[in-house]
Structures are given as C-alpha cells and as structure tokens.
Image (tube, rainbow, N blue to C red):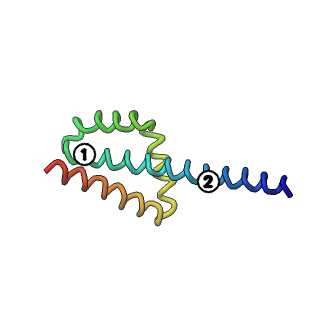
Amino acid sequence: MLFKKILFTILLSCAMLSCDSTETERMKFTKTYADILYARERNHDTAKANPEVREILKRNGFTEESFRQKFMQYAKNSGEMRAIFDSANAIFQRRLEKKQ
C-alpha cells in the first residue's frame, strides 16, 4: 500500500511538472509573439524591424525556424492558437497604453 502511495505521488508530480513545462513554453511563445508585434508596430520599415525581431527571437531562445515550427504546432489547434493570439494581443495593448 505504501508503495502505491509513493508511486502515485511520483506520477502526480511528473504530470504536474509536465503541465507546468508546457504552460511555461506556451507563455514564452506568447510573450515572444507580443514582443514581435510591438517591434513591428514601433518600426513599420521591415528593414529596420527585422534585426530587432531576430534579436527578440534570440533573447527568448528561438531561431526563426524554431519559432515558425512552434507557430505551426500551435496552429494545429485553433482554440489554443486563438488563446495565444488573445493573450499576445492583451500584452501588446498594455504596452501601447503605457507608451501613450
């Protein structure tokens, strides 16, 4: 019985850590997306904005390709993608309001 309780506790802990990791990864992607939106809003000239976008990706641990792959992964689930867009837009809007 004690073994089952220990095993259950370990499995529950692993599941919680896995969810936390997934949620953290999604939040990192969302924040990065919001940073990119903000950079594009500040700099409409893509020649000037692109280096900033690359720096944002790098600072957040992405390459252009890894960010694109993550985007496509999230896009497979329209509800999840909508939630990411909504969250990124909320972050973006708060930044715009602070700017004004």
| Mark 1 closeness class: few <14, some 14–19, many ≥20 residues within 10 Å | some
Q: Position of residue 86 (x, y in %)?
A: 36, 61
Foreground residue among 75 and 15:
15
Mark 2 surroundings within 10 Å by alpha-carbon count, few (fewer than 14), some (14 through 19), many (20 or more):
few
Residue at mark 1 to residue at mark 2: CA–CA distance: 36 Å
Q: Amino acid at mark 1?
A: Arg
Q: Does residue 44 appear to the left or right of 61 in the view shown? A: left
Question: Residue 18: x and y, percent?
Answer: 61, 50
State the image coordinates of residue 58 (x, y, percent, origin top left).
Answer: 40, 33
Question: Which residue of the protein is positioned furthest toward the bottom in this rendering?
Answer: 79
Quickly name the residue at label 1: 40
Residue at image location 65% in from the left, 54% down from the top: 15
Q: Which mark is residue 51?
A: none
Q: Is residue 59 above or below residue 8?
A: above
Asked which secondary structure carries label 1, the reply is: helix
Quadrant of the rendered image containing residue 40: top left
Q: How many marks?
A: 2
> What residue type is disc 2 on?
Met
The residue at the point 31 percent across, 58 percent down is 90
Q: Residue furthest left?
A: 100
Q: Which mark is residue 16?
A: 2
